[in-house]
Amino acid sequence: MQRAWFLLLPGFPVVDVTGAISVLEIANAVLGELRKKPFYRVLVIGAEAGAVLASSGVALAAEPLPARIQGSIAMLIVAAGPWLRTTGHSDAGRAVVESWLARMAPHIGSGATIGQDARTLVQEASHAARAMASARTATAPVHWSAVSVTRGVDLAMSLVAADLGGVIATAISSRMAAPFQRSYGFGLWQPQGRERHRGAARSTHWRAASVDLDEPAQVL
């Protein structure tokens, strides 16, 4: 199964995160019917083990950042909010997460951020990752997509469409509690550069022809 991890920091938008997780849950149900096994293995992680408070005050349980990773993370979504700047332990937590992102960059297939705070965090970690890579051996950069708050479901749908194709993405949309009044079929999600599939080069870009992400597939 493909690893789909959510890295949460204080103040993350709970609707975006739970909505994106729901998309992957439905994707697993659809693939379970078609291929008799789920496609994504979802994990929620944080700077430390325990509850992470969302912007609403609701908490989600998170596993600690793993010290090592065997294999790759197919999809990493980072979500954070203004509390990242205002909590008393924010500086220490931020440093831990930035260091982890920099070290794990070679293991990340595709990445995405929800909210400006998460985007800034990833940008700073990406600078550190490039410095670490230049000091050792060069590795392919991670291509990150960025969306604003309230677009978490759109983000997850775009990533699923890139992984599984427009037909599956449309089937997933039709099973959601409030299906979008748009199609995720062929012609909407188009590859740029080399085709993205298991084992393909990490430099693939995807763009939405009619439902654009705020900033799709950029090297941050």
Image (cartoon, rainbow, N blue to C red):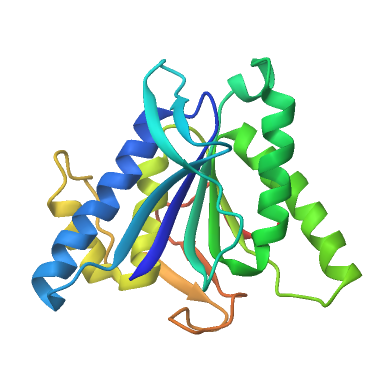
Residue at x 81% of width, y 53% of height? 127
- Which quarter of the figure is the N terminus placed in? bottom left
Q: Quadrant of residue 84?
A: top right
Residue 144 visible in the snapshot: yes
Quadrant placement of the C terminus: bottom right
Name the residue located 83 percent from the left edge and 77 percent from the top edge: 137
Where is residue 42 drawn, in percent x and y?
A: 35, 54
Closer to the camera, 73 or 188? 73
Is 215 placed left or right of 175 in the picture?
Answer: right
Q: Is residue 55 above or below residue 60?
A: above
Q: Residue at x 71, y 44 (%)?
A: 98
How many numbered marks, from 0 up? 0
Residue 14 image position (x, y, % from top left): 39, 29
Q: Nearer the viewer, residue 67 or 75?
A: 67
Quarter of the figure with residue 3: bottom left
Left or right: residue 130 compared with residue 99: right
Which residue is rendered at x = 70% and y = 74% of the image? 140
Residue 83 location in percent, x, y? 59, 19
In the image, residue 167 above or below residue 75? below
Toward which corner of the image does residue 105 lie, by quadrant? bottom right
Q: Is residue 97 above or below residue 117?
A: below
Q: Nearer the viewer, residue 135 or 208?
A: 135
| Residue at the extreme right | 135
| Position of residue 42 in the picture relative to residue 170 (left or right) | right
Whole-percent x and y of residue 50? 45, 31
Q: Compared to 148, does 211 lie above or below?
A: below
* Residue 219 in view (yes/no): no
